Amino acid sequence: MRFLLYYVGNTNVWQDMEPAGDVSEFPICNVSWRDAGSYHCRYSTKSDPPMWSEPSDPMEPPSYPKPNISLRPSARVAPGGDVTIRPSISVSPSGVIAPGRAVTIRCQCRCEARRLFLYKDGIKIRELNAAGDGGEFTILSARWEDSGSFSCRSRSRLEPPNWSDLSDYVRIVVAETYYPKPSISLRPSRGLGLRGAVTVRCRGWHQNVRFLLYKDGNQNALQDVEPDGDVAEFPIRNMSWRIAGNYSCRYSTKSDRPICSEPSDPVELVVAELSYPKPSISLRPSGVVALGGTVTIRCRGLYQNVRFLLYKDGNPNTLQDVELAGDLAEFPIRNVSRRHAGSYSCYYHDKWYPFIWSHPSDPVELVVAVAPSGCPDFIHTNITHLVLGAVVLLVLELILAETYYSHPREAP
């Protein structure tokens, strides 16, 4: 069997393994606080197509009184034998912050912290007494000078005191958001095979700017680039499940007081799972569909309890999606018009893992019956002429009748 381990709340596979027996072990080396949480796993056959188990119940952390603590040899120990711990750091609000807005930087350390220290670009700027397991540094009215990379560390209550490592960095950008959001797209546009390559393209509204790429709402940019024009390309090579997710981008001027755009709409980067056979697609009724009629696009997969998505060639956005208990999805199109004509395909994915898709179905062509060029106008013109002719004849008949009956007659 093939086992896959997931972190609860994250749709991406944490680790996968193919043991010889029926038990799989997933070692987590150099454990940090970020590894804490709930996990679940599932397994599948290695056949094509595979059979999947339901996800296990999540492994919840036990609610026990605090235990005694011990160290393994792999624990990080500072010179002199003092254990070092790295605190976590977060900022609210995240993203680009308008001047004058309040900003809160939260430093948290699950240790016996007594004093917290805040650093900007590697230089200590503030300190405060810890409250519980952390503390908050507040910038009451942000200015562009407050932009930078922030980190924190803690000092213990012991004598002599222990110092933690520096936390990871969070970036604060203070700027006016005058620029409109950029557009974002993928090339190729949809499902990619594992180890494939994709390029994220961002197009802005100004030249000579700096573009930044973000994933899944993370406030820290994955990549940044400064193109000569208004288009930035972010290549992603060797696709994996961990890379799949929602991406967005923004751009800013490169001046000391940057002007930033709003973030783009998100775009989904999905992985085409080889073990998910492509669905079949058909039309009901088949053949040519008349204007104003109704047609249903039917997609059938090989698995139950999946979500189907319908696409039309030339449109990167989902037209319709449906979740169902069976293996057949129906997408009705009522009052068919010329714009509905075209080539359609569909995909499906497990509802637990929204960024792991099947390969697309073969396309199906929807043909809409339309009158030859000029016929509608010809018909409308003839109808108009007939109506006008009938009105003229009626008026003439009324005039003749009026003349006939109003003319004086001679007595016999």
Image (spheres, rainbow, N blue to C red):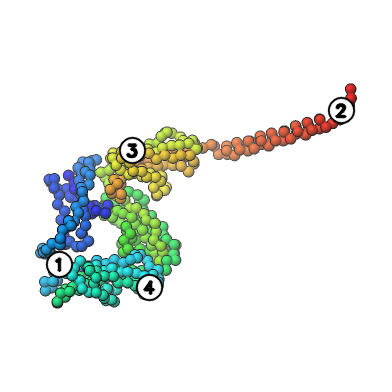
Q: Amino acid at mark 1?
A: Arg
Residue 395 seen in the figure: yes
Mark 4 sits on what residue? 141
Secondary structure at badge 2 equals: loop
- Callout 1 secondary element: loop
Indicate the quadrant containing the N terminus: top left, top right, bottom left or bottom right: top left
Query: Which three-letter amino acid code belongs to the residue tagged 4?
Result: Ser
Question: Dot 2 surroundings within 10 Å: few (below 14), some, or many (20 or more)?
Answer: few
Q: Is residue 343 above or below residue 35?
A: above
Calculate the distance from the C-alpha at mark 3 to the C-alpha at mark 2: 85 Å
On residue 328, the disc is: 3
Q: Residue at x 18, y 73 (%)?
A: 156
CB under 8 Å between discs 1 and 3: no
- Point out the tag, 1 or 2, that comes first from the N-terminus: 1
Tell me whether the residue at label 3 lies in contact with that at label 2, contact meaning CB atoms closer than 8 angstroms: no
Verify CB contact (< 8 Å) between mark 1 and mark 4. no
Instruction: Give the Cα distance between marks 4 and 3.
Output: 56 Å
Circle 4 crowding by C-alpha within 10 Å: few under 14, some 14–19, many from 20: few
Q: CA distance from mark 4 to mark 2?
A: 103 Å
Amino acid, disc 3: Leu
**Residue 360 visible somewhere in the drawing:** no
Q: Nearer the viewer, residue 91 or 17?
A: 91
Residue highlighted by disc 2: 409
User: Pointer 4 and pointer 3: residues touching (CB < 8 Å)?
Assistant: no
> Residue reaching furthest right?
411
x%, y% of residue 5? 20, 51
Q: CA distance from mark 1 to mark 3?
A: 54 Å
Q: Earlier in the sequence, mark 4 or mark 2?
A: 4
Q: Which mark is residue 253?
A: none
* Residue 176 spot, x, y in % from top left: 42, 68
| Of pointers 1 and 3, the one earlier in the residue sequence | 1
